[in-house]
Amino acid sequence: MSTGNGRASTFRRLQDAALAEAGVDVTSRFVDVSTPLLRVHLLEAGEGDPVLMVHGGNSVAASWAPLIAPLATQFHLLMPDRPGCGLTSGFDYRGIDLRGHGVAFLNGLVTALGCGRVALVGNSMGGFFALAFALAHPESVSKLVLLGEPAGADGDPGLFHRLIGTRGVNTLLYATALRPPREAAGTRAGLRRSHLVADPDRVPEPLLQCLTAGARLPGAVHSWTTMVERAFDPPGLGLVAKKTTITHALLPELRNLATPTLFLWGDKDPFGSPGVGRMLAQEMPDARLQVIEDAGHLPWLDRPEYCAEGIAGFLGS
């Protein structure tokens, strides 16, 4: 068995273990999307109105595991691995327009699934994809829930994103200091350093092992770094001058987005304070912000019960 196949098998096994804790049936299947041409891996659970959940960063669909049980009692959850993540086809983002890609990916997925109108739940880059899709296809989106800062919302990336958004520098970093860990303990330590969650000890061990294996899948680092290059390195700008081209660039259009929207924002989100979320909500005709105390950029990993209650109440109202 090749190293790539071995890592994929390991990831599948650890994904199943992480999902087993959900306590409900979660199915795994693949969906072919024509634009962009991809074989998308999808997790599916529950019955009811469709809810498409789009993860962020270099994560995987199984990261939603803590929310599955409470939401699957009311909704049909559709959780894809984003392009270049998990078991979905690898993806090179160099030369790709991220906004156009995000819209095309979600549109292709909604079309392939035959969902019609869906609610969208997104985190980070998944939040940016969700906003961009809702702006392009408002008729296809019933409601929006955005957990944590939608990627690049404050328009001024920190040093971390400046570095990994710089070609060459990111390659060196991911070959040395940021090399994906082999053990879940390394992932827990990374979460603690990055403040992605307020308390990494709250993340279940099986899920940590799944996230660790996902980061080591073939092509995962390349997809992640090339995506960040596109997001935080506009053409002609250097390391110091980097500005985001993603969520912050949508601000002038948000006043026209009538889709009911809920921001669930951790008070310790390292990529943007709740004030950024308040600013976004104020730009929109029908949006509100709920601040989650003692939570980071991935607030459902810190406070799953609170997030599930907020999502279910908003989508079910």
Image: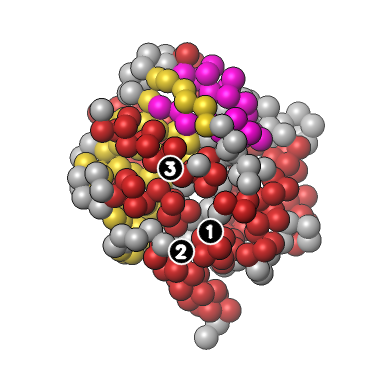
Residue ID at (38%, 58%): 22
Q: Which badge, 1 or 3, comes first in the chain's sequence? A: 1
Question: Bounds of the magenta span?
Answer: 262-281
Indicate whether 218 appears above or below 254: below
Which of the labelled discs sits on residue 18, or is there none? 2
| CB atoms of marks 2 and 1 within 8 Å | yes
Q: Residue 204 has which mark? A: 1
In this rendering, position of residue 205 left or right of residue 316: right
Residue 305's tag is 3
Q: Residue at position x 47%, y 13% from top?
A: 282
Q: Mark 3 and mark 2: span between their CA atoms?
A: 17 Å
- Say above or below: 277 vs 180: above
Whole-Å distance between the Cαs marked 1 and 3? 14 Å
In the image, is 152 to the left or to the right of 173?
left
Q: Residues within 10 Å of mark 2 (few under 14, many from 20)?
A: many
* Residue 286 lies in quadrant: top left
Residue 39 location, x and y as percent? 37, 60
